[in-house]
Amino acid sequence: MAENVLSGTTLEFDMSQKDLNDFRMYVGKCLLSGKVSSFQEDITSIDSSMEQFGEMSTDTGSSEDVHIQTVISVDKSICDDDEQSTLEDNTSALGDNVGNVRYPCAICGNEFTDLQDFLDHMQKHLKEIKKGKKAAASTTLCNKKNSKDTSTVNNQSNTKPARYCIFCDKYCLQLSRHIQLVHKEEDRVKAALKFSPRTKNKMFSQFKKEGIHLNNIEKLGKDSHAVLERERISQKDSVQVMCDNCNAILTKKAMSRHRATCQGGSSKQINAIPAQFFIKDNDVSESFVKNILTKFTKDDIGKICKSDNLVKKVGSILWAKNRTKVDQLSQVRKSVMNDMRRLAHAYNFFKEEVKKDHPLLLNTAADMFNRIFFKDLQEAVCKYTEVGDQYGKTSFKLKHGLKYALYYVLKKSAEILRAEHLSKFSIRVWIQKSKENLQKKSYLYKFYRDLKLCLDAV
DNA sequence: ATTATGAGCACTGTGAGACC
DNA sequence: GGTCTCACAGTGCTCATAAT
């Protein structure tokens, strides 16, 4: 019949010794009247409205105040529409010696001579009980969240996902408020708070997007096939793109509408960066591995071609672009491999140049596009494209064809690097994410900024 | 008393289908 | 690729509450 909606809920009451004694007296009377089946320190039931008072224990260590922990199971009927009638049915009115009717409260021990007063009082306890249920549920959820890592937090609820905070690496359900309260001293937050509410909200929304973006980068670092986090879950496995203005991840179709809102009144050109540039970062197709990567020889250049991320990325994009030319597969393959080897060669010369002046360990061919090494790159290109001294020291000859080819490969690489940078190392995120890192790599930031300006101007 | 956070509610903006 | 429309996931705001 009735369902115990609060079954297992723990409610704690602080009662005085007197109240406890009264309460015990009340239950004792209920026992005598047959409405309670048993009464010990662990009370199991009182009547049909408050069926069970179980696991009752007292801490008699303190003087006047007695802490009572009671587990209450409440009949659903008292929480529903008919709770009034149920309560009326269970007032358990007790008569005293002079015939006055008293209505003692089973929870707090108060006595009422007026039925309505008693019912109002019980309503108050019902509210407390309901709140107690919510609090218990909330505490449980909170504990669960605290013990879980980031990805599982989002799965906890289907409604509001916790968002990644770029300032403290925590996940918060109300990120904007959290940032406003906890990170109000951050420069970017200070700046955002100075704007109008509309602009401020937009800037806080940007913090959220950056958090999502950073989280996705981390996920991709661990697993290139990881399911990416986004603002809204797509029910369909649609093509995803990223807005190069705000880093929002959207479906390709939603981009045109997003462009209008994101652009606002600005004349700035907003582009969608295709998924190939950021979703599957280092992921190269099987055909690329089979037809290109496995074909390189085991010399130094071949090793660079097979291992360097930038060289691989350039190669895979060139391969993906031309693989539709099925009848020219062999030519395309040779062309891609040549471009990759040219890039690797250039990097090899570049490394030699850099080693002369800077005892730095270069990690990737992408360092060639670092503006502080621009002169080294120039030197490397010259050395790579000049014939050498076979015609005598005074008659250096230039390999024009190679230099042109190298120019286009470097240009292509720069475009790819830019796309990668916009998607993976957003300047704004980068600045905020790691100031220390930024100090070390401030030259890269300037380089990317200048490169972007140059490319925008073209 | 203050701060930080969760729940509930009303509203906004995105996803997706249809159509051009 | 753009526009329209509908459904609904997710947001901000307010209130309540736990933690300090």
Image (cartoon, coloured by chain):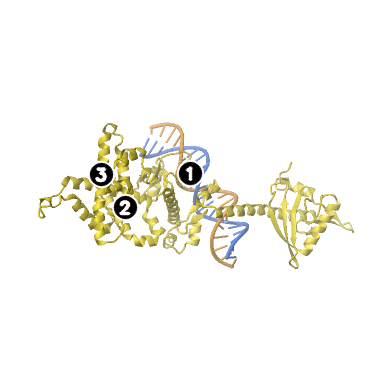
Chain colours: A yellow, B orange, C blue
Q: Residue at x 28, y 49 (%)?
A: A414
Q: Which of marks 3 and 1 is nearer the N terminus?
A: 1
Kind of residue at disc 2? Thr
How many circles with numbers are drawn on the protein? 3
Q: Do labels 3 and 1 share a chain?
A: yes
Kind of residue at disc 1? Ile
Gap in angstroms between the C-alphas marked 1 and 2: 35 Å
Q: Residue at x 26, y 35 (%)?
A: A330
Q: Nearer the viewer, residue A265 or A160?
A: A160
Kind of residue at disc 3? Asp
Gap in angstroms between the C-alphas marked 3 and 1: 39 Å
Q: Which chain carries label 1?
A: A
Gap in angstroms between the C-alphas marked 3 and 2: 17 Å
Residue that mark 3 sits on: A339
Q: Are marks 3 and 2 on the same chain?
A: yes
Name which quarter of the figure residue A288 lies in.
Answer: top left
> Pointer 3: residues within 10 angstroms few (<14), some, or many (20+)?
many
Image quarter (top left, top right, bottom left or bottom right) of the N terminus of chain A: top right
Q: Which residue is drawn at 42% across and 48% down?
A: A220
Q: Which is more foreground, mark 3 or mark 1?
A: 3
Give how far across and how far down residue C13 sits, in percent.
53, 55
Kindly indicate whether the residue at mark 2 contacts the one at mark 1 (C-beta within 8 angstroms).
no
Residue that mark 2 sits on: A364
Kindly indicate whether the residue at mark 1 contacts the one at mark 3 (C-beta within 8 angstroms).
no
Q: Earlier in the sequence, mark 3 or mark 2?
A: 3
Please say whether residue A107 is visible from this viewpoint: yes
